[in-house]
């Protein structure tokens, strides 16, 4: 009997959720392409033969989006528009046994560490010689670099350890190899990501080794910006700040999810920090790296957050004046410490109201900071050209989540992935307006 070959079929990969999921999808794309399979990422192909949906299962909204996407492609399969539907990622890792019976149209479910098993669906094997190689789904001038997988933190609200497992650092040599490969393909910016980047190295090197990793990566020729994401505040290695000061291509930027400011709420969150320890850490960071942009995220509506605790959070945000801030509402997750030990008593409407109030505070801060930049020259990295305007970012902005710089086309020709000196001429919402400066 002749074995079915999927190499003649068109395969479409759909990514839901965070940048860490995107890296996982890029690994899948790399392996499939390396095995001669016709695969694309969110190309808009109306009738792909096989669909791989890389799901998110972090909070309720993300789970709902993942389920809806699976159902949409399941209907397409029933209608004969798709031959095969495969599901991977966090939602599949956590709920695949339940979902098998509920959505039988899905051909197979894969967890977060089952790329080899997924590849066997296509009658191909995982190619170890592709380690270090990556298909980049975007324009290619920036890429995410996942430095570790999993998490050992006990946060009461978080289901990531259930879906991603224990913390596992990627060997430094592999990360240098990946970065060198990315640079050879024209990548100019790498964004370091992990569930907890400050834990990097503890398992492999028996110490927090993030500063050494940053130093090694900064030596890779062609990489102009290195950006640090998801630095857990408790136990943050302060030697990172020294290497950040010393190396010009390490951005003065840290994404540090603080989650809250009230010591009582932080205790219920099991974050291992307090209001006082958080203020002390932020003071040290700003003292050692003057002008650094700190991005953070805050959670509202966690059990135990009353009006007093919420006001404490608002006062903290006003006082600290973060360059960038995001807010999300508490989601009661099964099998987490919070899900088993707390009651989710705050109505969703109240959670959303608090989120809006906190973002209004941050909006005023962001507008004031933007106004202070009018008339100054900045270096920007050009990400796109939209409706006759170049769109770029400063050293203080990460793609997708932070501010953008809207650049008027001038006599100088710009290309996607170029660095450009611009003069800030005004503001537009959270974004800046600029024109090119001749050098």
Image (cartoon, helix red, strand yellow):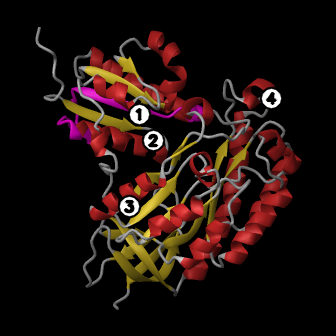
Q: From the viewer's perspective, is residue 74 above or below residue 411? A: above
Instruction: Locate residue 233, reporting x and y percent.
Output: 71, 56
Q: Quadrant of residue 5?
A: top left
What span is colored magenta in the figure? 34-61
Q: How many marks?
A: 4
Q: Is residue 340 visible?
A: yes
Earlier residue among tags 1 and 2 = 2
Lower position in the chain sequence, tag 3 or tag 1: 1
Residue 278 is situated, as x and y percent measured from the top left of the image, at 78, 59
Give the percent coordinates (x, y) of residue 190.
43, 61
Nearer the camera: disc 2 or disc 4: 2
Label whose residue precedes the other's in the sequence (3 or 4): 3
Q: Secondary structure at mark 4?
A: loop
Numbered badge on residue 54: 1
Disc 2 and disc 4: Cα gap in Å? 29 Å
N-terminal-most mark, 4 or 1: 1
Can you say whether 83 is above or below 149 in the image?
A: above
Provide the secondary structure element on which disc 3 rests. strand
> Disc 3 designates what residue?
142
Residue 41 visible within the image? no
Q: Where is mark 4, residue-wise?
A: 342
């Amino acid at each position: 009997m002749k074995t079915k070959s999927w190499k003649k079929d068109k395969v479409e990969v759909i990514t839901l959720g965070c940048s860490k999921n995107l890296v996982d999808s890029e690994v899948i794309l790399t392996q499939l392409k390396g095995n001669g399979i016709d695969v694309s990422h969110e190309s808009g192909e109306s009738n792909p033969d096989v669909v791989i949906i890389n799901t998110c299962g972090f909070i309720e909204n993300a789970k709902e989006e993942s389920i809806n996407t699976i159902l949409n492609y399941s209907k397409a399969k029933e209608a004969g528009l798709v031959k095969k539907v495969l599901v991977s990622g966090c939602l599949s890792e956590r709920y695949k046994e339940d979902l098998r019976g509920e959505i039988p149209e899905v051909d197979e479910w894969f967890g977060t560490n089952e790329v080899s098993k997924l590849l066997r669906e296509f009658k191909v094997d995982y190619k170890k010689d592709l380690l270090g190689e990556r298909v980049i789904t975007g324009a290619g001038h920036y890429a995410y670099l996942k430095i570790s997988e999993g998490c050992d933190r006990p946060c009461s609200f978080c289901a990531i350890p259930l879906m991603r497992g224990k913390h596992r650092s990627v060997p430094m040599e592999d990360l240098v190899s990946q970065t060198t490969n990315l640079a050879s393909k024209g990548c100019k910016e790498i964004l370091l990501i992990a569930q907890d980047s400050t834990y990097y190295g503890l398992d492999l090197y028996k110490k927090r080794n993030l500063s050494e990793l940053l130093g090694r990566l900064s030596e890779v020729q062609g990489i102009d910006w290195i950006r640090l994401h998801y630095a857990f505040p408790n136990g943050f290695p302060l030697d990172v700040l020294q290497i950040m000061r010393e190396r010009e291509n390490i951005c003065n930027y840290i994404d540090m999810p603080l989650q809250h400011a009230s010591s009582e709420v932080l205790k219920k969150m099991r974050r291992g920090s307090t209001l006082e320890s958080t203020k002390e850490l932020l003071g040290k960071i700003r003292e050692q790296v003057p002008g650094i942009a700190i991005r953070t995220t805050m959670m509202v509506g966690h059990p135990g957050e009353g009006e007093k605790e919420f006001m404490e959070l608002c006062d903290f945000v006003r006082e600290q004046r973060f360059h960038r801030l995001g807010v999300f509402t508490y989601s009661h997750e099964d099998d987490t410490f919070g899900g088993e030990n707390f009651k989710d008593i705050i109505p969703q409407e109240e959670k959303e109201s608090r989120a809006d109030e906190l973002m209004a505070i941050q909006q005023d801060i962001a507008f004031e900071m933007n106004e202070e930049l009018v008339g100054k020259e900045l270096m920007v990295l050009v990400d796109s050209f939209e409706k006759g305007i170049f769109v770029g970012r400063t050293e203080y902005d990460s793609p997708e989540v932070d501010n953008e710089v809207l650049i008027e086309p001038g006599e100088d020709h710009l290309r996607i992935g170029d660095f450009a000196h611009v003069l800030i001429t005004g503001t537009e919402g959270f974004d800046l307006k600029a024109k090119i400066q001749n050098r």
